[in-house]
C-alpha cells in the first residue's frame, strides 16, 4: 500500500492534472497467520478514525488476506462499517478494500477464469481462492509462494514473477492476478507478463488504485498500470 499505490498515483500525475497526498495508519502484523490477521482487522476501526481526522477523500484498506480471512463477502461489510466511522467523526469518506477491488477489477475487465500468484502459505492461499470463487470468479490455476514473514513478502523481488508465471498454465484463463497482495511488489513486472502471456494482468495494488480513482470519480488511466488502468474501465 505504501509503495506501489503512491507510485501509480505519481505515474498518473504525469498525464493528468490532479495531485495526490498519501496518508497511512498501520494495523499491526508480523506473521501472516489467521490469528494475527483477525487481530489486525479488529484494529481497522482505529485506523479509519485516525485517517478521518485528516479529512482524506478516499480510504483504502490494504490487507487483502485480512479481509478474506473474515469470511465470504466481508469486504462489503467492512467498507460499510469503516465508512460509518468516518461519518461519525464528521469527515465522511468512501472506503475501498484491496479484497473487494481485486474481485471488482477482475469482473470489470470481463474475466471469469483467472490464474493467481500469492505470497501466502498454501492454506491461506486456498482461502483466497475460495473467497474469489464465491464472488463468481473461477481461479483455474494458483501458486502459493509460502512466505510467512510479512517483511519478507515486501522484499520479494518482482523480477522473479515472470518466471513464476511461466510455470503456470495461462492459456485457458482470461486474466492473470500477478500479486494477490498489496505487500508483495509486482508493478515493474506487469508489462512483461502481459506481453509474455498475452493476457490482461492485474494486481491487488493496481485494483485498489483503480477502485480509489473510481470512488473519486476520476479517469482511471495510469501509464504502466496494465489493462485495468488503461482508462477503458
Image (cartoon, helix red, strand yellow):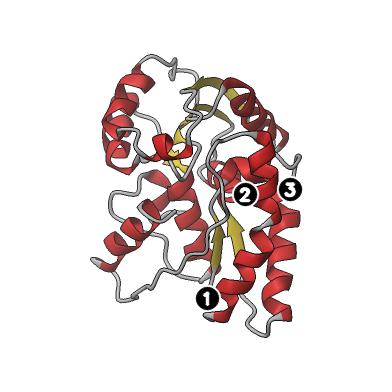
Q: Are marks 2 and 1 in contact (CB under 8 Å)?
A: no
**Nearer to the camera, 156 or 59:** 156
- Alpha carbon distance from label 2 to label 1: 18 Å
Nearer to us: label 2 or label 3: 3
Badge 1 local density, few (<14 within 10 Å), some, or many (20+)?
some
- Alpha carbon distance from label 3 to label 1: 23 Å
Q: Is residue 227 above or below residue 215?
A: above
Work out whether residue 201 can be spotted: no
Q: Earlier in the sequence, mark 3 or mark 1?
A: 1
Say which residue appears at 30% left-offset and 33% top-offset. Answer: 157
Where is residue 116? Give x, y as percent: 50, 28
Residue wearing tag 2 = 100
Say which residue appears at 72% left-offset and 34% top-offset. Answer: 134
Say which residue appears at 62% left-offset and 68% top-offset. Answer: 48
Image position of 228 (left or right of 49): left
Q: Is residue 185 above or below residue 160?
A: below
The secondary structure type at the circle numbered 2 is helix
Residue wearing tag 3 = 74
Image position of 129 (left or right of 178): right
Residue wearing tag 1 = 57
The secondary structure type at the circle numbered 3 is helix
**Nearer to the camera, 130 or 231:** 130
Image position of 105 (left or right of 192): right
How many labels were placed on the picture? 3
Q: Is residue 168 above or below residue 129?
A: above
Say which residue appears at 34% left-offset and 49% top-offset. Answer: 225
- Alpha carbon distance from label 2 to label 3: 9 Å
Badge 3 local density, few (<14 within 10 Å), some, or many (20+)?
some
**Nearer to the camera, 210 or 70:** 70
Q: Earlier in the sequence, mark 2 or mark 3?
A: 3
Where is residue 11? Give x, y as percent: 27, 60
**Nearer to the camera, 58 or 18:** 58
Amino acid at each position: 500500500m505504501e509503495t506501489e499505490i503512491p507510485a501509480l498515483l505519481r505515474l498518473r500525475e504525469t498525464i493528468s492534472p490532479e495531485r495526490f497526498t498519501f496518508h497511512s495508519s498501520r494495523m499491526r502484523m508480523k506473521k501472516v497467520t489467521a490469528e494475527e490477521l483477525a487481530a489486525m482487522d479488529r484494529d481497522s476501526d482505529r485506523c479509519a478514525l485516525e485517517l478521518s481526522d485528516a479529512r482524506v477523500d478516499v480510504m483504502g484498506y490494504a490487507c487483502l488476506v485480512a479481509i478474506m480471512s473474515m469470511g465470504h463477502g466481508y469486504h462489503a461489510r467492512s467498507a460499510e462499517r469503516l465508512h460509518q466511522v468516518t461519518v461519525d467523526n464528521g469527515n465522511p469518506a468512501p472506503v475501498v478494500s484491496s479484497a473487494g477491488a481485486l474481485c471488482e477489477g477482475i469482473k470489470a475487465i470481463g474475466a471469469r477464469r483467472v490464474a493467481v500468484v500469492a505470497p501466502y502459505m498454501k492454506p491461506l492461499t486456498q482461502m483466497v481462492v475460495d473467497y474469489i470463487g464465491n464472488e463468481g470468479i473461477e481461479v483455474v490455476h494458483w501458486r502459493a509462494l509460502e512466505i510467512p514473514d510479512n517483511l519478507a513478502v515486501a522484499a520479494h523481488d518482482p523480477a522473479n514473477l515472470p518466471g513464476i508465471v511461466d510455470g503456470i498454465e495461462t492459456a485457458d484463463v482470461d486474466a492473470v492476478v500477478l500479486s494477490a497482495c498489496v505487500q508483495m511488489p509486482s508493478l515493474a513486472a506487469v508489462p512483461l507478463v502481459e506481453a509474455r502471456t498475452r493476457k490482461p494482468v492485474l494486481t491487488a495494488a493496481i485494483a485498489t488504485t483503480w477502485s480509489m480513482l473510481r470512488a473519486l470519480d476520476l479517469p482511471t488511466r495510469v501509464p504502466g498500470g496494465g489493462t485495468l488502468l488503461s482508462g477503458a474501465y
